[in-house]
Amino acid sequence: MVEKRYDVAVVGSGFAGALIADSLVRSGLKVVILEAGSCFEDEKHLRTTLLESYHNSDESELFAAYSDYLAPTEGVHGHPYYDQLIGSGYSGNFLRLVGGTGLAWLGTSIRMCPSDFLMKTLYNKGRDWPISYSDLEPWYCVAERELGVAGTIDADILLNSYHSECYPMPPVPLSYVDQYVKERLTDLTFEGKTLYVSSTPQSRNTVEGYNGRPVCEGYASCVPLCPVGAKYDPLIHLRRALLNGAELLQETVVTHLDADATGKVTSATALQEGNLIGKIEARVFVVAANGIETPKLLLQSNQRFENGLANESGLVGCNLMDHLGKHSCTILRDPIFPYRGPQSTSGIEVLRDGPFRMERAAFRTAFRNDGWRIINGGPSGQEGRLGGPNLSASVFSYVEEEGLFGSNLKEKLGHVLLRQFALQSVVEMLPDSNNRVTLSRNLRDRNGLPRPAIHFQIDDYTRAGFAAAADLHMRIFDTLGVSANSTFIHLNADPDRADAAGSHIMGTTVMGGDPRTSVVDSNCRAHDHPNLFIAGSAPFPTGGTSNSTLTICALALRISNFLEKELPLL
């Protein structure tokens, strides 16, 4: 057993943990990063091992849950790691690895819009954030520089999301799919709004050498890993933090945090390979272990506090949110040459906000460059994966049902694969205290710790947004010349399907100004513990429609700035 003392102990090494560790160690602080997962010796090992594990793992040995591109095992409980108590099976996924889920993200880097911070005030739905878009805007700029975001502000202007700085790099060029769709949707309106196709901001290089990365070469296989390293991942800041003196303890599972009678957190107790390694002491603790493992750790830490740490409000684990994914795909009349360019480079953002949010959820819609991969795993599909009466469009049907071989099969495949088109809408959810993470009474992990128990159901507000997204998809298909009775596949018609969640886990340690109705304050400091901070997406009061990564990073950098100023007082 060992006992070490640091200025700051960071639990988790994903986006938030990596940025905070890098920032604080450069300020001269002694920082340790505690990561439950393992790291990789080199880039080749990383790519080989990660991909193999993604395809073969069905337990929580390496992954706390499946990746965001591999569908979870279906069944009574829907997921091999979670204990599904209520609902049809929550499928929000995350990785237990050094670098976290940032090793398998798409790269989409979108800001929340000002209205997302004022949902209760503007639309009488959900909650208001204790900070505004203006408070976070400077940190969005810093995050965009640190990650290296390529984009334009066109879509943000439509949502009143002003920029005090331009994006660091020009946008990734629109693919042929993007251009084809954009030309044909020029006059299309939806619920009174003219649809505008805009480039999607993303953390991949369009300028050679920015932050030491090469230019994106346009592969359509960015998840899990960019083939050339043009996409940002948290290892960039982790490496820099380690070079500057931070210490990384990998395969280190924090079982609980200890606090004294005053509420000050004094140490973290951790295991390595199931063996107790002792207490890690620090002046400040930052928990950045995602929206599932963060509340789980706090609830486990009940040696002195009956309900766990930071839980005087009783809200630790409550208000679990995600984004529902509405996926639709079709075969277009014209070849659009998919599988070129990053997997998504443009979309429709204008429907992310409006008075309709008083009645239904907002959504954003992305056009896919990777054919039907988002719903069947690859260009050829997999027998039985698509399901439904329109499976005749599947590649396998041409062999099995039509008996095509040789040149005839090649011709048919060429026709289908060149015309595959898919839409993906990200639908917001409201915070609901009944959707929550608790500790399982029945299931344990390999360390004997309780697994997370999930209560997760979809409300009518989100269902209405999901239905509106489906309507938009049909309108787009119709505009592109796909009639309702032609051969197309329309997936995720039921928002209760387990695979509808988008792996954007949010909201389980909600931020607010009142300790009675929130877990952390506007600086992400726990109301109950002066030296405990929670980073990541767990503090989100609402989720909006933007992918959560850029907001996670902006909040992390804001936390770092606060700690640099306040640490001498803690």
Image: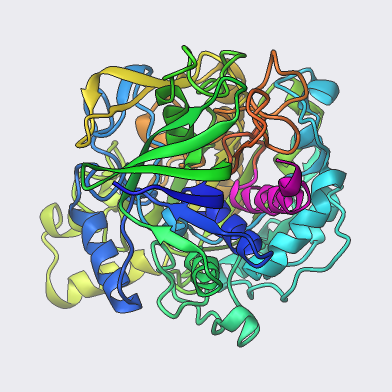
Where residue 13 sits in the image (x, y, percent)? 47, 54
Q: Where is residue 4 in the image (x, y as percent from the top left)?
A: 44, 51
Q: Eyeballing the image, is 507 above or below 472?
A: above
Along the horizontal axis of the image, is 4 left or right of 556? left
Give me the residue at 70% from left, 64% from top: 144
The magenta stretch spans residue 348: no
Q: Of 138 and 446, which appears nearest the observer?
A: 446
In the rendered image, which quarter contains the C terminus? Answer: top right
Residue at (47%, 74%) from the top-left corner? 340
Q: Which quadrant would residue 177 be assigned to in this image?
A: bottom right
Q: Quadrant of residue 472?
A: top right
What residue appears at the point 70 percent right and 21 percent down from the top-left corner?
126
Asked if residue 481 shows in the view, the reply is no
Q: Which of 556 and 59 is in front in this view?
A: 556
Q: Which residue is farthest bottom?
A: 208
| Majority secondary structure of magenta residues | helix
Residue 548 is covered by the magenta coloring? yes
Instruction: Work out whether residue 83 can be spotted.
Output: yes
**Which residue corresponds to the image point at 49% horizontal and 55% vertical from the top-left?**
32
Tell me residue 480's x, y (percent).
57, 55
Left or right, 329 with respect to 311, comes to left
Horizontal relation, residue 18 to residue 139: left or right: left
The total number of labels drawn is 0
Using the image, determine if residue 107 lies above or below residue 243: above
- Magenta residues? 546-570
Q: Position of residue 121 (x, y in %)?
A: 84, 22
